[in-house]
Amino acid sequence: MTQNKNGIASLLRPVFTTLNCVALSGWIYVLCIIMSRGPELNVEQSIRNILLLLETICFIEVLRIALGNLPGNLVLGLVLHLIRLTVILIVLPNATLLDNHWITIGILGSWATTEVARYPMYIFRGSIMAPN
């Protein structure tokens, strides 16, 4: 059973690496939007759609943690990404006061910075630069 599980994981590794590269690129894009617009940042639907896509990839990783395919804290991952999903789906669309507000820039900037720093660990796993 363990050998079958490892075989499936090794077959899917290129898919997960591609997903991680897409997520890293997406978070870099979000970070660039935040930095280029600065205080003029409005979180329109197109940005929320990108954030939803990126959070979907994060939920795939949480599922992989639950299945034992990735190391990590399952409870922390679930709570963190459910909070982010709530902010994206409920808070941002209904909070017009947060358009052009430093809180929005701070929240999205911290998410993007965290993910840009985190994804290389998944992409370059096994290299001397990434810890095991």
Image (cartoon, rainbow, N blue to C red):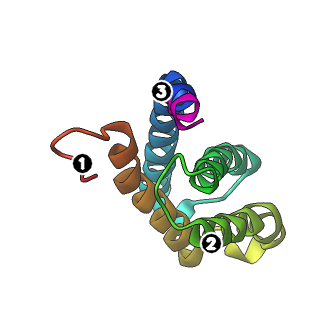
Instruction: Please name the residue that numbered disc 1 is placed on.
Output: 130
The residue mark sitting in front, 3 or 1, is 3
Which kind of residue does numbered mark 1 sit on? Ala
Which comes before the other along the chain, label 3 or label 2?
Answer: 3
Residue 2, x across and y down, in percent: 54, 38
CA gap between label 3 and label 1 equals 19 Å
Query: Which residue occupies 32% across, 41% down?
Result: 125
Q: Which residues are magenta?
A: 1-6
Residue 14, placed above or below residue 84: above
Which kind of residue does numbered mark 2 sit on? Val
Residue 124 appears left or right of 114:
left
Residue 87 appears left or right of 127:
right
Q: Residue furthest front?
A: 1
CA gap between label 1 and label 2 equals 24 Å
Instruction: Please name the residue that numbered disc 3 is placed on.
Output: 10
Q: Quadrant of residue 41?
A: bottom right
130 in the magenta segment: no
Q: Looking at the image, which is closer to me, 36 or 107?
A: 107
Residue 110 appears left or right of 132:
right
Query: Which residue occupies 51% across, 31% down?
Result: 3
Instruction: Please name the residue that numbered disc 2 is placed on.
Output: 75
The kind of secondary structure element at disc 1 is loop
Query: Which residue occupies 55% across, 71% down?
Result: 107
Numbered tag placed on residue 27 in the rendering: none
Quadrant in the picture for the N terminus = top right
